[in-house]
Amino acid sequence: MKRVSVIDVGSNSVRLLVARVDEANIQPLYKTLRSTRLGAGVDANRVLSSGAMESTLGAVRDFKEKSISMGADEVLAVATSAVRDASNGEDLIREIGRLGIRAWVLDGRQEAELGFVGAALGCDAGKECIFLADIGGGSTELVTGTGLRVNNYISLDIGAVRLTERFVRNDPVTPAEASEIEYYVMDILAQSAKDITAGDCKMIGIGGTITTLAAIAQGMEHYDSDRVHNFVLTLSEVKCILEKLAALDISEKKKIPGLHPGRADIINAGAIILKCLMEHWGFECITVSEWDGLQGVIYQNFIRVHQNAGRIPPQNA
């Protein structure tokens, strides 16, 4: 088996996955992230700030070094909403290329498809109908499909960073601000997601907002991906977490078990997005997946077979 790595340059964080692959399987070895808030200000200005670009490039450089130290034969990088929306996004891609990393910007469809493939593989969905929700910093992707085949998708500009910047001015978030976010999300879903139907699909969720909510629901003092993966998060738990968050300022939220400090200021908006998605399509629960677009990139670029790669192997080196 060869070793490869994928770096995901997102709106809130840069993530790394190092994995073993062969012609039919993905075995995760190491996964980490660094919050760089690349998407800060992009919704208003459509420009990546020099500071955010510098810290993001630093994370990419460090992740490449980690990948090489673990024996990765190839390092790939993909960028999503913030780079997609920014007028200077290609500048960042060129700088990543100068580090010797093959990098490209995913459009909304590619991001949706890769996330769907990764989640379907990780949750061993087989021929089950899936409704996938991927809540990111800048956008939310919704995908329906069966097996590894996508039937329908949409990419919406309702990410946790974007909506926090657009609506939140106080700490703690006021009830009026929370209501504004909820009304805006529901309006976007009613106007722009008419073609997405849930039917009898199983809802699966990926992205930092959803995995964080799973960790909070379990009161994790230390993040445990094995406990997060395939955890079933209920709508009532999401509502309870939102009620708890509503009374806390950022410094208090940073003390919540399971909540990464770098996500404390955007978790309210992210949780509201998930609540709206579940209520809009009538889901009482969502299965949380640690497998996502990172595994999707590996599958599409290295495995090149059209069969389910099976259950996730143990994460050991």
Image (spheres, rainbow, N blue to C red):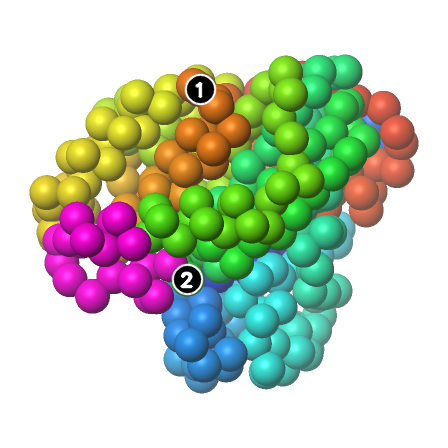
Query: Within 10 Å of the Cα at label 2, are there few (<14), some (14-19), or many (20+) other Cα atoms?
Result: many
**Which quarter of the picture shows residue 36?**
bottom left
268 horizontally vs 6: left or right? left
Q: What residue sits 30% from the left and 21% below the top?
A: 236
The residue that mark 1 highlights is 285
In this view, the residue farthest toward the right is 305
Q: Which residues are magenta?
A: 163-180
* Vertical position of residue 37 compared to residue 115: above or below: below
* Vertical position of residue 91 compared to residue 112: above or below: below
Q: What residue sits 81% from the left and 31% below the top?
A: 149
State the image coordinates of residue 100 (x, y, percent, origin top left).
Answer: 71, 70
State the image coordinates of residue 113 (x, y, percent, origin top left).
Answer: 72, 43
**Which quarter of the picture shows residue 152?**
top right
The residue that mark 2 highlights is 162
Is 178 in front, or is 91? 178
Q: Three-letter amino acid code at disc 2?
A: Arg
State the image coordinates of residue 205 (x, y, percent, origin top left).
Answer: 52, 32
Q: Three-letter amino acid code at disc 1?
A: Cys
